[in-house]
């Protein structure tokens, strides 16, 4: 079961990584100072995920690293991959 979960998470993150290439070039430069972890948490709250310490940590990771945010929210904070992608995008870009 653990192997299946690991494979599912890795597959989800890989699929989301392919979608990153659609992000405009200006967004690829990294954090621009306009986004915050709070925006990420607000988005998750708006789609039905209450704030937990794991989700707050994932959003904080998202401010510094898009891929770490995705991995953490999907695997540790039990967030749907599509919602995690949008939340991490809001925190990072």
Image (cartoon, rainbow, N blue to C red):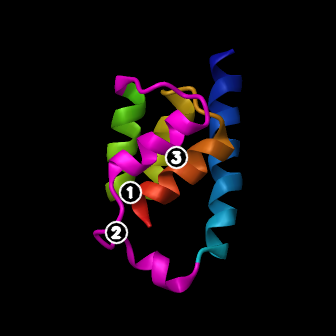
Label 1, label 2: how far apart the Cα atoms are:
9 Å
Helix, strand or loop under label 2: loop
Q: How many marks?
A: 3
Relative vertical location of residue 25 with respect to residue 21 in this rendering, above or below: below
Relative vertical location of residue 35 with respect to residue 86 in this rendering, above or below: below
Question: Is residue 92 part of the magenta span, yes or no?
Answer: no
Position of the N terminus, as image quadrant, is: top right
Viewer-proximal residue among 12 and 78? 78
The x and y percentages for residue 41 are: 43, 40
Position of the C terminus, as image quadrant, is: bottom left
Viewer-proximal residue among 60 and 75? 60
Packing grade of label 3 (10 A; few <14, some 14-19, many >=20) is many
Q: Work out which residue is located at the far left of the displayed protein and give it.
A: 33
Residue at 61% over, 36% down: 47
Question: Is residue 33 part of the magenta span, yes or no?
Answer: yes
What's the magenta region? 24-53
Residue 65 numbered tag:
1
- Residue that mark 2 sits on: 31
Residue at 42% over, 32% down: 55
- Residue that mark 3 sits on: 70
Residue at 44% over, 47% down: 40
Viewer-proximal residue among 79 and 36? 36
Which quadrant of the view contains residue 5?
top right
The x and y percentages for residue 3 are: 66, 23
Residue at 67% over, 46% down: 82
* Mark 1 or 2: the one toward you: 2
Q: Earlier in the sequence, mark 2 or mark 3?
A: 2
Label 2, label 3: how far apart the Cα atoms are:
16 Å
Packing grade of label 1 (10 A; few <14, some 14-19, many >=20) is some
Helix, strand or loop under label 1: loop
């Amino acid at each position: 079961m653990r192997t299946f979960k690991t494979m599912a998470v890795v597959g989800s993150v890989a699929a989301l990584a392919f979608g990153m290439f659609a992000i405009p070039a200006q967004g690829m430069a990294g954090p621009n100072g306009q986004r915050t972890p709070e925006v990420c948490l607000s988005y998750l709250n708006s789609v039905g995920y209450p704030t937990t310490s794991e989700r707050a940590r994932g959003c904080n990771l998202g401010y510094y690293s898009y891929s770490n945010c995705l991995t953490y929210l999907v695997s540790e904070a039990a967030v749907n991959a599509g919602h995690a992608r949008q939340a991490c995008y809001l925190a990072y870009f």
